[in-house]
Amino acid sequence: MYIRNEGFFQYIKNYPIVSTIILLHVLLFIMNFIPLIPHKYIFQWLSGVNLYIADGQFWRLITPIFVHASFPHLLFNSFSLLIFGPFLERLVGKLIFCIFYLICGVIGNIATYLLLPLTYSHVGASGAILGLFGMYVATIVLKKHMLTMSIQQIIVPIVVIALIMSFLEPNVNIISHIFGILSGYLMGIVYLTAKKKGIQ
């Protein structure tokens, strides 16, 4: 899972959804440094601002998933998706993976809107990324045989560390992290249960 044997173009061909999401991350981040593009307005219009969401700008429940505030932020989320996304894209299929990923991110953003002050603003794919980890946990619970023991031993500590760091690191959207991983876990349980019963 973690050692990629594909070349660059083969990776893109095999995992188009993961590749497209990472490309959006990078392009939107680069646009912040191109002088001819009004990057200030791009960031302002795509970030999640609870006050503006309350005013009817509901696209802000989706767009923050693809925007990052700093290079380390971009690097961590994109690298996590690069490493952990392919297995799930192959497991559930391109369309379902895309839907699951977006739902995890949106649920995290809806929870952020409902539980945090109207003055709160946020960006980042962390809620969606944690949703992927939740799906891995669901796979361990219901389809443990699909993952090697070494992978299971890596995923569980990563989930625990990610949750702990959510409370320790400053400027982290804890609500998005928690609801992202919960939604990923629940959707994973529903999907794998339905697949086991032959519904999928």
Image: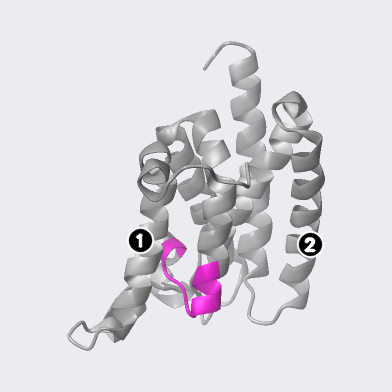
43 left or right of 119 in image: left
Query: Which residue type carries mark 1?
Result: Leu
The residue segment tinted magenta is 65-75
Residue 42 in the image: above or below residue 17: below
Does residue 185 show up magenta in the picture? no
> Chief secondary structure of the magenta span?
helix
Does residue 66 show up magenta in the picture? yes
Q: Which residue is drawn at 71% across and 36% down?
A: 138
Residue 87 % position (x, y): 57, 38
Which element is circle 1 on? helix
Query: Which residue type carries mark 2?
Result: Ile
Q: Which residue is drawn at 51% across and 32% down?
A: 90
Q: In 3D space, how far apart are the residues under numbered discs 1 and 2 (Cα atoms)?
A: 27 Å
Q: Quadrant of residue 65?
A: bottom left
Q: Specify whether residue 108 is in view.
A: no
Which disc, if any, is residue 24?
1
User: Closer to the N terminus: mark 1 or mark 2?
Assistant: 1
Name the image quarter holding the N terminus: top right
Q: In which quarter of the image is residue 108?
A: bottom right
Q: Residue at x 39, y 41 (%)?
A: 10
Which disc, if any, is residue 161?
2
